[in-house]
Image (cartoon, grey):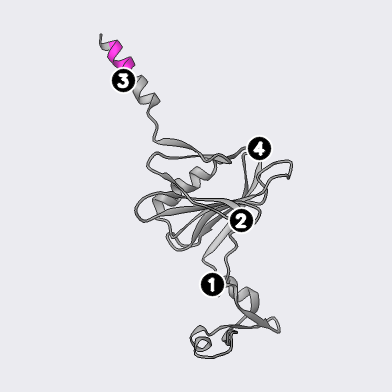
Amino acid sequence: MKILNLLFLAFLLLNYSSENKIDFGAFSMKTPKKWNYIKERGIDSFIGKIGIDKRDTLYFDYGLYSSDLEESFNGGYYYIINNDSIFTPDWELSNSDTIDEPIYKFFARGGKNKLLEFKKDTFYYEKINGLKAKIVVPKKPEMGTTGVYFENTRIDGKGVSFQINGYNLKKKNQIEFLKAIKTIKFKD
């Protein structure tokens, strides 16, 4: 009888998993059981959210125009003159003007190299299920974007792009997310 109880207990423990495979239709991913899929309606792509907890949410976009998760500086608006002087919009001054164009102010010297100092995120590439993936992580935990971008969702190059990311994720959620993105599988 004890052996039967031990076998039953071992069976339960082996079959208990803290992971859940979510099938989104176009792709699937293994996630912690507590994560839940939130359907969204896209115009030209398949979009959605994954609720991690009360604070953190992931956002995905599967389509032709998915973001490559490249971080922009100051909303992407800046000018560099003579490869040195950086000018950014002065939104406060621009809002007080009647012209529908931003007014720029001097920001710093150092050109593009100086801009790199202000980036919150860094990235690296690796293969996930045979596909080249750009993985983005913040330089400082809980301050920036964590995500993955696939320029193409098929090995033969006939797919579309895909990205999934979260912003300012708690360290625990970031670790779980980085583990989950390695399980992403796309359907043909």
For the residue marked with disc 4, what is the amino acid? Asp
Q: Please, what secondary structure does the residue beneath circle 2 have?
A: loop
- Locate the N terminus by quadrant: top left
Tag nearer the camera, 3 or 2: 2
Foreground residue, 177 or 6?
Answer: 177
Q: Is residue 82 visible?
A: yes
| C-beta proximity under 8 Å, tags 3 and 4 | no
Tag nearer the camera, 1 or 4: 4
- Locate the C terminus by quadrant: top right
* 152 to the left or right of 148: right
Q: Is residue 134 visible?
A: no
Q: Position of residue 125 (x, y in %)?
A: 63, 51
For the residue marked with disc 3, what is the amino acid? Leu
Give the CA separation, mark 1 to mark 3.
Answer: 54 Å
N-terminal label among 1 and 3 = 3
According to the picture, the residue beneath numbered tag 1 turns out to be 118
According to the picture, the residue beneath numbered tag 2 turns out to be 66
Residue range of the region highlighted in magenta in the rendering: 3-8
Residue 109: quadrant of the picture? bottom right
Give the CA separation, mark 1 to mark 4.
Answer: 39 Å
Neighbour tally class for label 1: few under 14, some 14-19, many 20 plus, Cα within 10 Å: few
N-terminal label among 3 and 4 = 3
For the residue marked with disc 1, what is the amino acid? Phe
Tag nearer the camera, 3 or 4: 4
Residue 89: quadrant of the picture? bottom right
N-terminal label among 1 and 4 = 1
